[in-house]
Image (cartoon, rainbow, N blue to C red):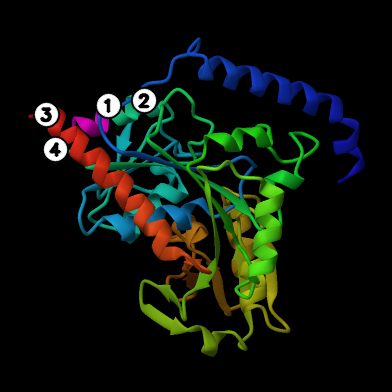
């Protein structure tokens, strides 16, 4: 922790009190939460960025889309537009935000929407034809104006919320006590060989409620990188000179997975908007070498760099164990919610 963050500790105490009061007022019904007659699954965290929300959203899409019409609703962070927007053929990372655009490109049949007002976004989605059976709320754990039916709380293995402090001293958006709202807790970015003993130590530190199951996942890397021309084997490019670029929170695992001696590394802030000067600098430093980036960065860089030079590395959520249990919990929630909704419509 740097000196400035230590100095700002009184602000962290104040911020913690304000967020506690806000949650207390929502819990007591003084501040109102909107409920909807559709299964709502909220994915989020207690800290600022870097817990793997997008891979978890994609995991849920793959898990549920064979049997249900899925919609995702995001805020659309750093987009150039306002209000409610549904992704269509004209959508760009600028109009949607990088993560919603990633979902839109990756899952063409998915209904992707953005709206900073989540309640309004849900109402608009429920007016869409055909209407979605399930709405996945991206980064909505603190969005108390909407009451989701199921909450998935993510925390990174190397940066557990139980070890963190409130902003600005730490990285917590709200106190660790907010974890009580979660139905399940998923510890992400774990080493693939994390032992059962180590998992139990983490569970003890998180101190879940009796109704909360804790799961452990790691980052699953694709065997290929991709661009508009097709795939290229990671084994082929890993030892080749290249430029690695990431504008995401906590990019170290991405770099470690691909980096070789002589590679150029470029780090940018999460959701970074690349200027013309920065693009020119990237191309100059690449000096004809391949540029490998994250999937989220690719949707912002596409069209700004030669398509044959720019590649992205897909990642996915991989459960270390008990993945079937997680899947069944989610399927049971959706099935029960859908059945109840259908009975009310009769």
- Density class for disc 2 (Cα within 10 Å; few <14, some 14-19, many ≥20) is some
Q: Is residue 202 left or right of residue 290?
A: right
Which residue is at the front of the view, 119 or 100? 119
Which residue bears the numbered disc 1? 123
Above or below: residue 281 compared with residue 11: below
Viewer-nearest residue: 196 or 170: 196
Judging by the rendered image, the residue that carries numbered circle 4 is 129
Q: Are marks 3 and 1 in contact (CB under 8 Å)?
A: no
Observer able to see residue 257 = yes
Q: Residues within 10 Å of mark 1 (few under 14, many from 20)?
A: few
Question: Do the residues under discs 4 and 1 have CB atoms within 8 angstroms?
Answer: no
**Residue 126 on the magenta span:** yes
Marks 1 and 2 sit apart, C-alpha to C-alpha, by 6 Å
- Name the residue located 69 percent from the left edge and 78 percent from the top edge: 263
Identified at 45% across, 36% down, the residue is 75
- Secondary element under disc 1, as helix, strand or loop, is helix
Q: Which mark is residue 108?
A: none
Nearer the N terminus, badge 4 or badge 2? 2
- Magenta span: 124-128
Name the foreground residue: 15 vs 187: 187
- 170 above or below 93? above
Which residue appears farthest toward the front when viewing the image? 210
Residue at label 3?
345
């Amino acid at each position: 922790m740097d000196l400035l963050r230590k100095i700002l500790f009184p602000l962290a105490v104040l911020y913690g009190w304000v967020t506690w009061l806000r949650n207390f007022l929502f819990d007591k019904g003084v501040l109102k939460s909107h409920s909807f007659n559709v299964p709502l699954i909220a994915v989020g965290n207690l800290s600022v960025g870097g817990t793997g929300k997008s891979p978890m959203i994609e995991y849920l899409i793959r898990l549920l889309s064979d049997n249900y019409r899925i919609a995702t609703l995001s805020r659309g962070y750093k987009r150039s537009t306002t209000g409610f927007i549904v992704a269509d053929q004209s959508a760009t990372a600028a109009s949607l935000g990088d993560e919603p655009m990633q979902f839109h490109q990756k899952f063409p049949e998915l209904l992707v929407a953005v709206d900073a007002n989540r309640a309004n976004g849900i109402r608009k989605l429920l007016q869409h034809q055909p209407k979605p059976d399930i709405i996945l709320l991206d980064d909505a754990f603190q969005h108390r104006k909407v009451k989701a039916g199921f909450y998935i709380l993510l925390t990174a293995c190397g940066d557990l919320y139980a070890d963190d402090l409130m902003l600005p001293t730490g990285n917590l958006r709200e106190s660790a006590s907010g974890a009580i709202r979660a139905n399940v807790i998923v510890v992400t970015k774990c080493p693939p060989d994390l032992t059962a003993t180590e998992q139990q130590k983490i569970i003890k530190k998180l101190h879940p409620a009796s109704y909360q199951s804790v799961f452990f996942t790691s980052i699953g890397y694709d065997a290929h990188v991709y661009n508009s021309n097709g795939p290229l084997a990671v084994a082929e490019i890993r030892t080749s000179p290249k430029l690695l670029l990431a504008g995401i929170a906590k990019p170290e695992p991405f770099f470690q997975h691909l980096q070789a001696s002589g590679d150029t590394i470029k780090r940018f802030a999460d959701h970074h908007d690349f200027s013309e000067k920065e693009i020119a600098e990237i191309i100059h430093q690449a000096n004809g070498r391949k540029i490998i980036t994250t999937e989220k960065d690719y949707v912002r860089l596409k069209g700004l760099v030669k398509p044959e030079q720019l590649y992205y590395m897909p990642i996915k959520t991989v459960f270390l164990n008990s993945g079937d249990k997680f899947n069944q919990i989610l399927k049971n929630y959706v099935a029960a919610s859908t059945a109840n909704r259908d009975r009310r419509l009769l």
